[in-house]
């Protein structure tokens, strides 16, 4: 991660807060719908149109549930929640160290190996680092914790 100014750091934190709020909103809509509430009832409750509820439910349809013992449905979301202030550093290190990472897939394109990041893979941690959600020291701490736990 490169050093960012306070103003740009505020942008990163605000964006993470917005993203996790959107994820929470969509998951809550899914739960309300699964509990039997109609789109019209949900729309009346939150004072939006039924088509808006329908669109949000459509966007939420592929949204993964959060596994027990974790704060997010994947490593990137866990990092977003950390940046948004929902997790302490020790918590995010512990969760990222315990995550069961999906192996990356390699494909051959013009005889040049190309890594394709898989959902739930280590590439999400690297993306979180690139996006300024976490820093190199946190990644080092995750890897040290994986070693300590015998998960490396």
Image (tube, grey):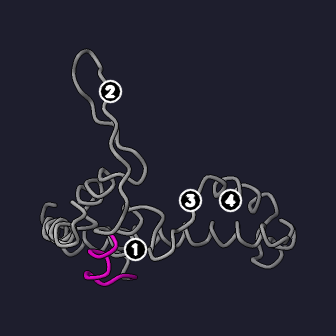
Could you tell me how far apart the alpha carbons at marks 4 and 1 are, in whole angstroms?
A: 21 Å
Q: In the rendered view, would you say 76 is above or below 11?
A: above
Mark 1 / mark 2, whichever is N-terminal:
1
In front here: 111 or 102? 102
Dot 2: element: strand
Furthest residue in direction front, as rendered = 150
Could you tell me how far apart the alpha carbons at marks 2 and 3 are, in whole angstroms?
A: 25 Å
Task: Give the residue at mark 3.
Answer: 64
Label 4 Cα crowd, 10 Å radius (few <14 / some 14-19 / many 20+): some
Task: Give the residue at mark 1.
Answer: 81
Q: In the rendered view, would you say 119 is above or below 131?
A: above
Dominant SS in magenta: helix
Marks 1/2 in contact by CB < 8 Å: the verdict is: no
Specify start and end residues of the magenta stretch as a single range: 86-95
Task: Give the residue at mark 4.
Answer: 56
Could you tell me how far apart the alpha carbons at marks 1 and 3 are, in whole angstroms?
A: 15 Å
Marks 4/3 in contact by CB < 8 Å: the verdict is: no
Dot 1: element: helix
Residue 96 placement, left or right of 45: left
């Amino acid at each position: 991660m490169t050093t960012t100014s306070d103003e740009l750091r505020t942008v990163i934190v605000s964006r993470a807060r917005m993203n996790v709020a959107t994820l929470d909103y969509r998951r809550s809509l899914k739960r309300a719908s699964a509990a039997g509430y109609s789109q019209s009832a949900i729309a009346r409750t939150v004072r939006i149109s039924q088509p808006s509820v329908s669109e949000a439910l459509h966007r939420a349809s592929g949204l993964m549930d959060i596994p027990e013992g974790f704060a997010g449905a994947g490593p990137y979301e866990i990092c977003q929640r950390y940046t948004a202030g929902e997790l302490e550093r020790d918590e995010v290190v512990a969760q990222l160290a315990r995550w069961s990472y999906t192996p990356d897939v390699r494909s051959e394109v013009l005889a040049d190996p190309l890594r394709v990041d898989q959902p739930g893979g280590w590439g999400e941690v690297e993306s979180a680092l690139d996006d300024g959600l976490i820093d190199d020291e946190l990644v080092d701490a995750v890897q040290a914790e994986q070693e300590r736990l015998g998960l490396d």
